[in-house]
Image (spheres, helix red, strand yellow):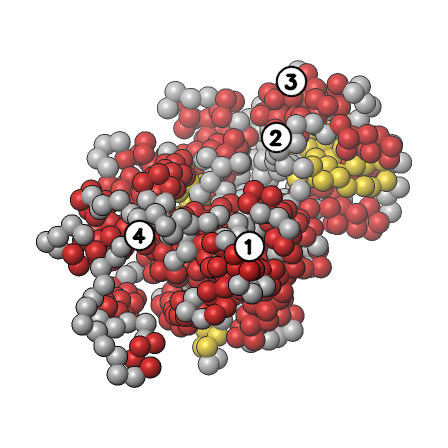
Amino acid sequence: MSAQATGIHHTSYAAELALRHTPAEKLRLALLIALLLGLPWCLNGYWLGIVNGIVLSAIGAVGLNLLVGFTGQISLGHGGFLAVGAFTSALLTTRAGWPLPASAGAATLLSAALGAFVGLPALRLEGVYLAIATLASQQIIEFVICRWSWLTGGQGFLDVPRLALFGERASRGSFERGWYWLLLSVAVPAVLAARNLFRSALGRSLMAVRDHDVAAASIGIDVGRAKLTAFALSSGYAGLVGALTAAYAEVVSWERFTLDTSIQYLGMIIVGGLGSVAGSIYGAVFIGLLPPLLAELAALAPGSGARLSAQLPALQLGAFGLAIVLFLLCEPRGIDQLWRRAKDYFGFWPFRY
Amino acid sequence: MTVDRTRIPSDSSPQRLACAALLLLAACTRQREQEPPAQAPEIVIGVLADLTGPTSDVGRLYHEGMLACIDDLNARGGIQHRRLRALSDDYGYKVPVAEEKYKKYVQSAAVAVQGWGTGDSEALRRKVAGDELPFMSASYAEVLTDPQQSPYNFVVAATYSDQIRIALDQIAAADPGAQVAVFHHDSPFGNAPIADGKQWIASRGYQLGYQDYAMRSGATDFVASLQRAQAQGAKYLIVQNVASPAATLARDIAAQKLDMKVVCLNWCSDELFIQLAGAAAEGAWMVQPFAPPSVPKPGHAPVRQYLAAKGLDLDAQGVHFVQGWYTMQVMASGLEQALAGGELTGKSLRSALEHMAPVDTGGVIGSVRFSPQSHRGASSAGVYVVQNGKLVERNAPAAPRS
């Protein structure tokens, strides 16, 4: 049971539909906005680069959570859809000369369509069988992008020219900051869309399928359609991230979209909180900050610094695994639940519940 | 995977709350600067290495050679009295990690970056062009030699394509009508020289047969592919892969008693291949742009001297150590030239590398020379043959026949 603020009444339907009602919620929103607006002014290029990576993975994690956390369909193929988005967008930009918004839009749509196709086995399969089916899709996509020489003109990678805004190309100094604003302007609507989806009939039907598909069918939900919609939405988000990654990294190659990537995204939503939009973001922040913060710690460690640095990749991998195991054991609902509990603690104080 | 919505969370313990608070603090507070700003007299170079990833067996040696060269240069007073500082990072052969480390180098005002593999070289190619940072690596892909496509990449040794051309020249000279099978790593790195090899046969009018076979990553044997190569009638197997799969291939050939000769291109032309393949390595040809320590060249002397002072032996370190050393040496020559010309920036370093006099490597890579039209430093490679577990020179370093 969570703490509910009392004494809130609405005088219009619009007010009731608002995402935030209490002053505390509005204050937190204001703080968050201030943080997001202030970040580029107090971080250097290196840390802003890491933040940009986190913003990108946050969009992807929200997408995967739509499928895994909200609809209950496991997927090991998220990395593959990122690849589809990245290659589609890069090809449309470089060979057909499309501007980024158009090519990213097309990449999103194509990934969504492919996602729905790959989701077809979900109509018949569940659990570990579905996991293997999606793993197959990941492998097939990897195989295709590795082998289809037309994609990259036989080079094995695709160049994407540095993004020019109003004819201006970002220089070394302003590159990360420019991208931060661009990525944020995509991430905010994407996250809000996901947040609102689960206040709509479609979103609730997805959750009904997750909780009990037979019960969902008995109240008139088309289970197959709901599952495919979830696959399409999730892959669409992945395609969007892929397209943005292609433009941000300025090069697309298969190495970025391996099974490792899919596992990392799963790790994000497990750590952040399955079935929570905010949790996906917490997970992306946690998994994104873990390796660089560990590197900082290793550099700070007195004396044994060099030895620690030498083992850093192993430590980072170990910490990733440990974080997932600890969260699964201690708090399966992730950071999001920790945050709720923290709020409840203060909400109920001085009572325990 | 469903989430149990009915479970009421257990009561919140202070430790967990503290954890959450710490996490938030970590996420929100401003991080300290990654590296202190470089002191004016130091020359900062970013060095990416694979010390723990799939290519760490050779990556570690290459990296050690590179750091040894920097150490040696510093011991001699640096370049124009400015010390070199290497920011070296293990990226485990993961492209996103390489990109993250690269951002750190940019932030730390590095003037050049030494990369490692095909993946990171390709991923960072556009970045270094945008940020104007000269970049060298141990990836010898053809695309990196073209300043139109890769304006800030420099390739110090013969490309994979040149290596396969040299291998084909040698095979055609030894056995003009032979069937050649190209066994390659199943990736852009492995695929890189295949089409160029085919074109070379056509343009030179060789009568060689030519067929390529992908080597699956992690395969424990290549018997099935070898049977296909046998059906082709292959006498020569050019291998574009790293040492351990190449050694597996050589052992399979020996076990099947096939009449095939392994011709390694540079990533399996090393002591590691000989060690892993054992007796099966005997007689294999190796196309290697860098002279191995077992074939003494004047250029080995400073490396040997440096190692001897540390109580180490160059023969034990092997050819990849030399490769790392001389890649850094070429970069150092560029730095020297740029500093002599005035201000040291990425741009001035690029121009210095393009216009400097050929770098004499004492016969290790021949002479390395770049120009504004071509960043192909050298195109010659020696051909060695394995005899009694040692690399012995078969043909002195030569470029593909023109």
| Position of residue B353 measured from the top left corner of the image (x, y, whole percent) | 49, 54
Tell me the distance, in whole angstroms, between the alpha carbons under discs 1 and 2.
55 Å
Q: Secondary structure at mark 4?
A: helix
Q: Which residue is mark 4?
A: A337
Tell me the distance, in whole angstroms, between the alpha carbons under discs 2 and 4.
49 Å
The residue under the point 55% across, 70% down is A104
Q: Which residue is mark 1?
A: A214
Instruction: State which mark lies toward you, 3 or 4.
Output: 4
Instruction: State which mark lies toward you, 2 or 4.
Output: 4
Whether residue A50 appears in this view of the structure is no
Give the chain letter at badge 4. Answer: A
Q: Which residue is mark 2?
A: B243
Instruction: State which mark lies toward you, 3 or 1.
Output: 1
The numbered dot on residue B278 is 3
**Tags 2 and 4 on a common chain:** no
Instruction: State which mark lies toward you, 1 or 2.
Output: 1
| Position of residue B206 measured from the top left corner of the image (x, y, whole percent) | 86, 43
